[in-house]
Image (spheres, rainbow, N blue to C red):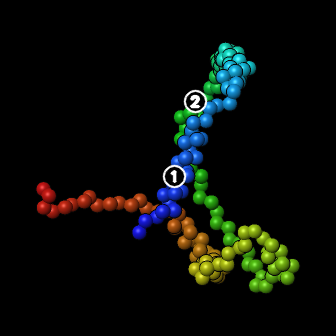
Amino acid sequence: MTNDHGDELDSILDAALSEYSNAEPRAGLESRILRRVQSAPPERQWWPIAGLALIAAVAALIVFVRLPARDVPAALALTPPAVPPVAEVVFPKKTPASRPAVHRAQEAHEFPMPVPLTPEERALLRFVEQQPEGAREALVQSAQIDPITIAPLEIEGLQ
């Protein structure tokens, strides 16, 4: 099974392309190229830009050298930072169970929307409200953490 139409199309395309490739350029091509090269703007000179950059660098160096050095007092330079004391725990006052409708309408437009408390957070809040002294003791004890000690590693059979 042969494709006679494909061969005919190939020969038409080959003939058209051979005519296209044998075409001569339009008259005056050389003169147009020469006119374009002669009318091109001159190259930019780099020395004015380099001179401005050099002047800016010298000015920055003069300002840097002329600024007085700031001395750090010896007491500030050698003193370790002070450790702040443990803050007093302040518990919030009890809020009423129901809120007025005005507050609920305002909260609907808050961004980001407040996230409801988890059951663990509600339990902690109840504990703090019911036993404020016990909560204060638990927080103070948790602030005093003993350092962790790790026993030396012993591996049998590698000695």
Toward which corner of the image does residue 41 lie, by quadrant? top right
Task: Identify the residue at horizontal 51%, vertical 52% (top origin).
Answer: 11
Question: Could you tell me how far apart the alpha carbons at marks 2 and 1 are, in whole angstroms?
Answer: 95 Å
In the figure, is residue 131 to the left or right of 106? left
Pointer 2: what residue? 74
Please state which of the two labelled residues, at mark 2 or mark 1, is closer to the viewer. Answer: 1
Query: Where in the figure is residue 93, as x and y percent of width and height?
Result: 73, 75
Toward which corner of the image does residue 112 lie, by quadrant? bottom right
Query: Where in the figure is residue 55, as x and y percent of width and height?
Result: 69, 16
Neighbor class of circle 2 (other Cα within 10 Å; few <14, some 14-19, many 20+) is: few
In the image, what residue type sits under mark 1?
A: Ser
The reply to whether residue 56 is visible in this rendering is: no
Query: Where in the figure is residue 58, as x and y percent of width and height?
Result: 66, 16
Toward which corner of the image does residue 2 lie, by quadrant? bottom left
Pointer 1: what residue? 11
Helix or strand or loop: what does disc 2 sit on? helix
